[in-house]
Amino acid sequence: MVVAKRTQPVMSSSPRRRGRKERLAEHTDLEDQPPVWPGVLGGRLKPLSDAEAEAVEEAALSLLETLGLSQAIPSMVDRVCAEGGAVTSDGRLLFARELVHRSIAEAKRGFTLCGQDPAHDLTIDAARVHMSTGGAAPGVFDLETGAYRDSTLADLYDAARLVDAMGNIHHFSRSVVARDIDDSAVMDLNTAYACLSGTAKHVSISITEPQNVQAVAELCYAIAGGEAAFRARPFLTVMVCHVVPPMRFAEEACEVLEQAILAGFPVQLISAGQAGATSPATLAGSLAQAIAETLAGLVFARLVDPEVKAIFAPKPLVADLRTGAMCGGGGEQAILMAAAAQMGRRFDLPTSSIAGITDAKTLDAQYGAEKSLAVAMAAHAGSNIVTQAAGMQASLLGVSLEAYVSDNDLLGNILRTIRGVEATRENIAADVIVEVCRGEGHYLGETHTFDRMKSDYFYPHLGDRRSPLDWEADGARPVGDVARDKTRALLATHFPSHISDATDRVLRARFDIRLPRARMGVAP
């Protein structure tokens, strides 16, 4: 029998066995070995067989080549036709298959989505998984009353700073709409400001109209210390739904896309048809259409700038065909997102998927079941950025602030499953088994156990693992109540200051910022 060499000394049973504190003191490096991290490698889940994935790819390429998309903007027509595309007699822009293949092959890979703080940089490469918020919900479930109400700019800032404090939410995508601002230009600018002030992590927002892009760019340049500094380390992505399914471009959004790329922003290219309404009722048909629509956006983005950091984001949605209403919590949505992520991995493109858009309205069993199923499947399929994974409720209609805090635990557990079993010779630890069986007969006092208790195990921050009697003695509180208290405490104390006071005053003198400084915990 071959026995692996131990990397740590074995505890002998004959000398005095040292106390737990003594043993832990010898292994203080455990704190530097977290059980989960941004960019855990996924991609093992493949709901499509090779033949099915090939059929979806072929259908998407054929649709682009023979049907094309309507309502292409003039600059897109010029660029695509110069590379072998054509316009049909009824005005549909066709994409040559060779052009689509070249766009996929030459797309930028292995890039960084930068945080304002480099400690939050995300490596978007291969099947590395990162958890994100998202949704652009029109409402929130009030932290104090639980009642649904219109969302505000202050709610958006609060959501950003909660995410700033959550270790397992790696990226902040604008989650609610500032319904208290009517003017779209002012709303776009203040959306960027609230997100960027609330967190030093990478931020993604959408921009309503092309004429609003430059103001958001100027805000980012000012925060970065200049245009060149931002272009070198862009910390904000512009998300663009460049299509209005089925197979039709959104003209204004395409102009936003073009302007955003020219301004130096990374972009996320989103197709979000709804099965049975704006895409086929079958999951395979909805997927194929979404892939085609998203690839069309990728071709255009790369023709604007071959060096663009573009994220492939087919996000087909599912409807309850009894009512036509969108439903994000079913098994259909979960498997569809996993399949979309698999197609991204097939093309080896930086990929984002939508998951976690539970239909539940509160932190209950439906919430946990639906969110866990969808997020886990998209992540295991290797989506680089899983959006809507935290905070979202009510089929994209509402956000819960306390859900960010509880979801931090849920996402940590999911990330741990993605990391896997890691069945290496060292991890199997056959030598430890031999020594324990010939010694004390248990692993509780082994150095090997203490070495791995932090690096191999994720411990929830809110999840309750006490006995029923201890839980009852402490008030028998459900996790939602515990999360609400934690959220209140964070909102009362966590005011990120990565943007200096001097810079903030310069921004306010230059731009129409609507979020009061007092609301941000600083003097007027």
Image (cartoon, rainbow, N blue to C red):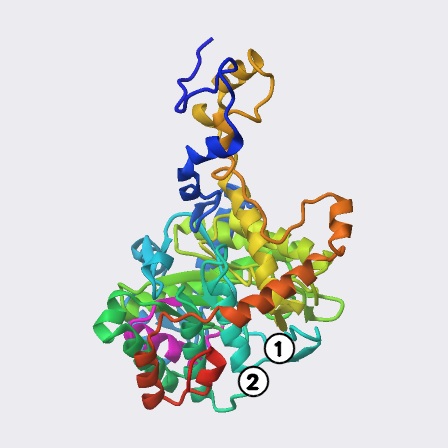
Q: What range is drawn magenta here?
A: 248-267
Q: Does residue 487 show up? A: yes
Residue 456's x, y, as percent? 50, 37
Name the amino acid, label 1. Gly
Compared to residue 91, the image places residue 403 above or below, namely above
> In terms of sequence position, does the residue under pointer 1 or pointer 2 come before the other?
1
Residue 212's x, y, as percent? 38, 85
Closer-to-camera residue (52/47)? 47
In the drawing, does residue 223 fall left or right of residue 165?
left
Q: Residue at x 58, y 49 (%)?
A: 377
Instruction: Tell me whether circle 1 and circle 2 mark residues in contact (CB < 8 Å).
Output: yes
- Magenta highlight: main SS: helix
Closer-to-camera residue (313/303)? 313
The dot on residue 493 is none
Compared to residue 461, the image places residue 520 above or below, namely below
In the drawing, does residue 189 fall left or right of residue 393?
left
Residue 327 lies in what quarter of the image?
Answer: bottom right
Q: Is residue 259 magenta?
A: yes
Q: Does residue 317 show up? A: no
**Quadrant holding the C terminus:** bottom left
Distance between mark 1 and mark 2 Cα atoms = 8 Å
Circle 1 crowding by C-alpha within 10 Å: few under 14, some 14–19, many from 20? many
Residue 139 lies in what quarter of the image?
Answer: bottom right
Closer-to-camera residue (406/243)? 406
Closer-to-camera residue (247/364)? 364
Residue highlighted by disc 1 = 139
Residue found at the far left of this picture: 228
The dot on residue 179 is 2
